Structure formats: C-alpha cells, structure tokens
Amino acid sequence: MDLPEIAQREQRPMYGGGMGELGVGRGQIELLAAMFHPDAPNDVAPSAYNEDE
C-alpha cells in the first residue's frame, strides 16, 4: 500500500505543493525535499531565488 492509499484510508488530507510556497510553506517544502531526497535533484528552488532584489 502506498502513501496516497494510506492517507485516503485514514481520511488524512494530502498536499503536494504548488506555486504559492513563498511564506511558511516554502521552508516546509525545502525541509521535506532535503529530508527525503538529500542526494537527488529536485525542483525546489532555495528561498533566496524568490526574494526581491
């Protein structure tokens, strides 16, 4: 059984991310990417990438 099936069985909502992670969600998605894929490429840009110049 994979994670989406477990979440559905336990009626737990899932969130897959999106373009709006510029607040607290940005730090969370960066942390999750670092925890689960520390040696692999991912599409999560560092927070500084989205900061004003």
Image (cartoon, rainbow, N blue to C red):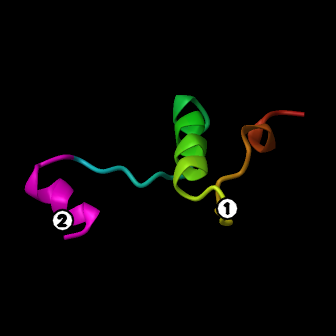
Using the image, determine if residue 40 lies above or below residue 19: below
Q: Is residue 20 visible?
A: no
Choose the circle earlier in sequence order: 2 or 1.
2
Residue at the image position 57 percent from the left and 41 percent from the top: 31
Q: Nearer the viewer, mark 2 or mark 1?
A: 1
Is 4 included in the stretch rendered in magenta?
yes
Residue under pointer 2: 5
Q: Position of residue 46 (x, y in %)?
A: 74, 45
Quadrant position of the C terminus in the picture: top right
Quadrant in the picture for residue 20: top right
Q: Position of residue 16 (x, y in %)?
A: 41, 55
Is 37 included in the stretch rendered in magenta?
no
Residue under pointer 1: 39
Residue at the image position 23 percent from the left and 47 percent from the top: 13
Q: Position of residue 10 (x, y in %)?
A: 10, 50
Q: Position of residue 6 (x, y in %)?
A: 17, 59
- Residue range (magenta): 1-12
Name, please, the residue furthest toward the bottom: 1
Q: Nearer the viewer, residue 12 or 31?
A: 31
Q: Secondary structure at mark 2?
A: helix
- Mark 1: amino acid: Asp
46 displayed left or right of 40: right
